Amino acid sequence: MKEKKQRFSKEATKKAMRVFRFIKPFRIAFAFGMLVLVLSSAITMAFPKFLGDLIDSVNSADENAVNNITLLLVGIFLSIAILSFFRVYLFGYVTHKALALLRLTTYKHLISSPMGYFSQKRVGELSSRITSDIALLQETFTVTIAEFIRQFITIPLGLFFLLFISFRLTVFMIAVIPVVAIIGIFFGKFIKKLSKEAQDDIAESNTVVDETLHGIASVKSYANEFFEILRYKKSIDSSVATSIKRAKWRGLFIGLIMFASGSAIISIIWYGLHMVQVGEITIGGLLQFAIYSAILGVSFGGTADLFSQLQKSIGATENLMNILEETTEEVALEASEKIEIEGNLSFKNVSFSYPSRRDIEVLKDISFEVKKGKQLAFVGPSGAGKSTIAGLIFRFYNPENGMISVDGKNIVDYQLSQIRNQMALVPQEVMLFGGSIKENIEYGKPGATDKEIFEAAKKANALEFIESFPDKFETLVGDRGIQLSGGQKQRIAIARAILKNPAILVLDEATSALDSESERLVQEALDRLMEGRTSIVIAHRLSTIKNADNIIVLDKGRIKESGTHADLIQLENGIYKNLSTLQLTAV
């Protein structure tokens, strides 16, 4: 994927400037850093002047002139050293503090964003924003901005001193330099293009590695190791070819630049020495001119890189500001006061379409009610809207029409974090965090005691396999729980839900991907978990919902049938009866 080229624009720059609000809490340290930067830059520009005076003082009638100017130069370097320390420290302090605040603010904003936002964004991209983009800003605030301001001071002062030392020599230098600049611009753009192509090739090869390692099971099951090696080799070979081509042209560029720069320097020195011979400038003055010219050359040479860095920073900042402009949910970012609900839940004429697919109505005029402690099950073909109902219960989305009520009160009138704290979800694909088993269970109730965690694991039929591990509850589950089987992960999720002790429980096809033995253990745990609490069960296997108080059959977003298992199995040509027959036949 080609990188979007960042350009300076009024809108982008205005948006990027908003990042300075994160520096505001540390503005005093930042102001001192700027003052120190200005002073150190100004003092540095005085060095060539006094060095030239030192050379000319050899012929001075004052015997102490050499010693006095030498001491003055030592004082200049001491001042520069002290000021440099404070500049680096102050800019580093402000940068790390400000970017830590930006990183935390961005993370809070991301984690508070609604589910609809994440359905439209790639997780890798969002992760990159909070890592790579902020890392780029760190370089900008610690180095780039300071250097840019230094050049802003250095270039005008340098030109002033050059004109003050010798107007004629300055004009001669300005006439020679464009030749070097033209060579640099011509080759620089071409080499930059080759560098970009090489980076794209490397990125492509990294993509191959990423895809291969994430899909290693598929690679090995299809015995396609040789194919992936060839694919990786092809991308590497392309990168090498481009890099060698770049090295060739870069070598030619460096050779020409060295020749042109050397010729320009020799020309300036030749003309300067001619002026010394005719008494228009002293040797010390020529040395001053040479040093100021070198400083200006370095400053002008680095300006392009600084602008490039600033362009990237503006792009990175704009991306971060775009995230911070997104609407968030009104969730509590600190521990909120708990509420108690009975668990009566009802949908009344609810219709819904996903934000990314407004033209497709997923739920159409859905109405149902489930009383406290009762079990309501949803069945139906894939795409009927079952999981969407679960998402609406948790207010991952809000209905377009109709109303969802909890204990007779509109669900939107509850504080979002408080109502979600009274609910628990056990999904088909359990997401475990990369810590220990204990930490994953404790996620249901942060700060729970060891005894509470032990009892939750016991009720979830998880204790047997947990205690079979050498580290027991401290066993690390690996990335996304990779060290555990599907049934084990489900029981950890059930233990987490038991520990939370919710009033409303949602089970989203929690046993559909398990083998028979694992399903039996998980179902036993689920039966304990559902006991005495309002339970919404989204089922694939009808055998798991035979005892539900009510079963709703969904098809194409509408309620087609409703009743107990015994009622629905009697309906001739009913969807539920047909599903039951198909599953019995499959068995």
Image (tube, rainbow, N blue to C red):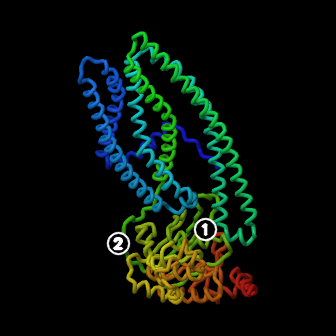
Position of 423 compared to 98: left or right?
A: right
Element marked by disc 1:
strand
Classify the position of the C terminus by image quarter.
Answer: bottom right
**Which kind of residue does numbered mark 1 sit on?**
Leu
Say which quarter of the image contains residue 83. top left
| Crowd rating for badge 2 (residues with CA inside 10 Å; few <14, some 14–19, many 20+) | few
Q: Earlier in the sequence, mark 1 or mark 2?
A: 2
**Which kind of residue does numbered mark 2 sit on?**
Glu
In x, y percent, where is residue 251? 63, 36
Position of 92 compared to 384: left or right?
A: left
In x, y percent, where is residue 373? 48, 85
In x, y percent, where is residue 272? 45, 17
Element marked by disc 2:
loop
Query: Does 407 appear above or below 201?
Result: below
Identify the residue at horizontal 47%, vertical 82% (top origin). 473
Query: Does 347 appear above or below 299?
Result: below
Query: Does 289 appear above or below 406?
Result: above
Position of 98 compared to 203: left or right?
A: left
Query: Does 20 appear above or below 229?
Result: above
Residue topped by disc 1? 363
Mark number, residue 337? 2
Identify the residue at horizontal 75%, vertical 70% (top origin). 222
Position of 364 compared to 434: left or right?
A: right
